[in-house]
Image: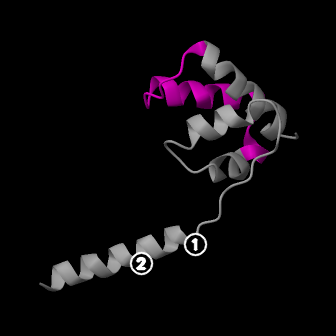
Amino acid sequence: MKTIVAFSVLFVGIAAAQADEKPVALKNAPGKEAVENTCSVCHSLDYIRTNAPFMAPQVWEAEVNKMINAFGAPLTPAEAKPIIDYLVKNYGAGG
């Protein structure tokens, strides 16, 4: 019984924390909608802004390819290109 109560309290705490989560606002530029609709299915868009200072163009490309090849993101190369372009132009290291 104590386990059920503990899990219930934990679940309510997590749900409350998620309810307070603010939406992530990305830079408004071509490709933004593709990033929001595709990337946010699996992870927070905070990842983009948090890692931007470290992500050179080739790193963003490798990261998107990793999402496709290692994690199964359902993207064709044609669908991935505007996402990579958006990330490089708007969140590339030094950008």
- The overriding secondary structure of the stretch rendered in magenta is helix
Image quadrant occupied by the N terminus? bottom left
Residue in the image at 74% along x and 53% along y? 25
Q: How crowded is mark 1: few (under 14 residues within 10 Å), some or many (20 or more)?
A: few
Q: Residue 20 carries which label?
A: 1
Which residue is at 80% across, 30% downward? 30
| Rendering coords of residue 16 (x, y %) | 47, 75
Q: In which quarter of the image is residue 3?
A: bottom left
Give the magenta part as a residue range.
Answer: 52-77
From the viewer's perspective, tell me whether residue 72 is left or right of residue 50: left
Label 1's element? loop
Residue 32 rendering spot, x and y as whole percentages: 73, 36
Please state which amino acid type lies under the numbered disc 1.
Asp
In the rendered image, the residue lying farthest to the right is 94
Q: Which label sits on residue 54?
A: none
64 up-or-down from 22: above or below: above
Query: Taking 90 as reference, is 14 left or right?
Result: left
